[in-house]
Amino acid sequence: MKKNVIVSLADANYFPLLEELINSIKKYKESESVAICILDAGLTDDQKKKISNKIDELKAAEWDIKVPDYKVKGKEWLKSQVSRAFLPKYFPKYDKYLWIDCDAWVNDWNCIELYLKACENGKLGITQTIGPGYKITSKVNWLIGKLAIIKSQNFKHAVKSKIGYSKARKLAFAPHINIGVFSLEKNSPSWEIWQKNLRQTLKSGDIFGSEQLAMNMAVYIDDIETEFLPLNCNWITSNLLPKYDEENKTFIEPYLPNHKIGIMHLAAGIWKDGKDMRVDKDIKIEIKTLDNKDILKSLRHNN
């Protein structure tokens, strides 16, 4: 019986990305011992049939915390902002859960092993969106002297969610945590803490980003035990483009020692001429090779 599981969620629009994520996992022999479970937020019958022989379980995502209809506006994919905090409820027979957003894909299996190791003993395995090459972490508009308007992602969402200015200030300049990839054990106390915070953030804030704010609160305010993994375990391409190693045909970090990218994450999209690479897989952008040569390359899996 498989003890560990990789979970993702998609609707019909993001199905091509979901399929690429699944294929990127299945290409590794080690994946045979890890289950793949999918939360359905609006897949078509044909799409579900297409992946049925590649995954272990598929269940419909629900609103695990009641959200007013006016906030939903028919966007079923927003269930991902709630349901991922309740993974053991959907798929209860596993010991360790690794969530990967469907707009991400696996480039190095060693990264999967790191996440499964990181969450041992109830800890949260996750990365911070800060590292070599990041030139700015928060935006600030300076007014007069020491007065400034803080525009950090955490602070903005915290204020809108009305969690209180004391908590918002604690989050203002904390390195932002992206929950597009994270790991937790089934019995980790972090699930309940995250859910508690999520109920609070959903009351007044937007649905989108609420669960991410709730997790940032869990780490920086509730001080849950966390194992911070290196950036290549959740490489957000919109923050910093990778380089490409032509000899080994793989994406790598742009700075020495040029570690191999573990999980490539297209969060926020890669845009060219008004088009998003997540929607149009034929889009190619200019990136550097390991030899510092300019090439046109897609950041999608196997493209």
Image (tube, grey):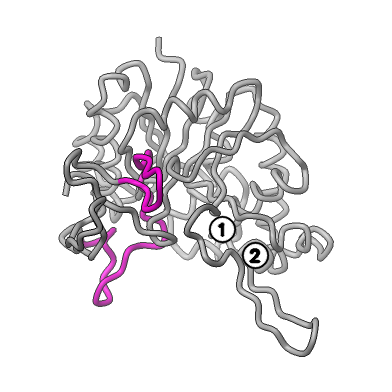
Front-most of residues 63 and 181? 181
Identify which residue is drawn at 53% across, 46% down: 179
Q: Which residue range is magenta in the image?
A: 252-280
Percent of width and height locating residue 138: 61, 68
Q: Where's residue 126, x and y in %?
A: 55, 39
Which residue is labeled 2 in the image?
157
Tell me, yes or no, whether the two marked residues, 1 and 2, touch with CB atoms within 8 Å. Answer: yes
Q: Quadrant of residue 106?
A: top left
Tell me the kind of residue under disc 1: Gly
Say the numbered circle drawn on residue 209. Answer: 1
In the rendered image, residue 29, in percent from the top left (x then y), is placed at: 26, 20
Name the secondary structure under disc 2.
Answer: helix
Q: Quadrant of the N terminus?
A: top left
Question: Magenta part mainly helix, strand or loop?
Answer: loop
The mark found on residue 9 in the picture is none
- 270 or 93, nearer to the observer: 270
Residue at the outermost top position: 1
The residue furthest bottom is 144
**Sequence-first disc among 1 and 2:** 2
Residue at 53% x, 42% y is 83
Q: Amino acid at mark 2?
A: His
Measure how far apart labels 1 and 2 are at the Cα level.
Answer: 8 Å
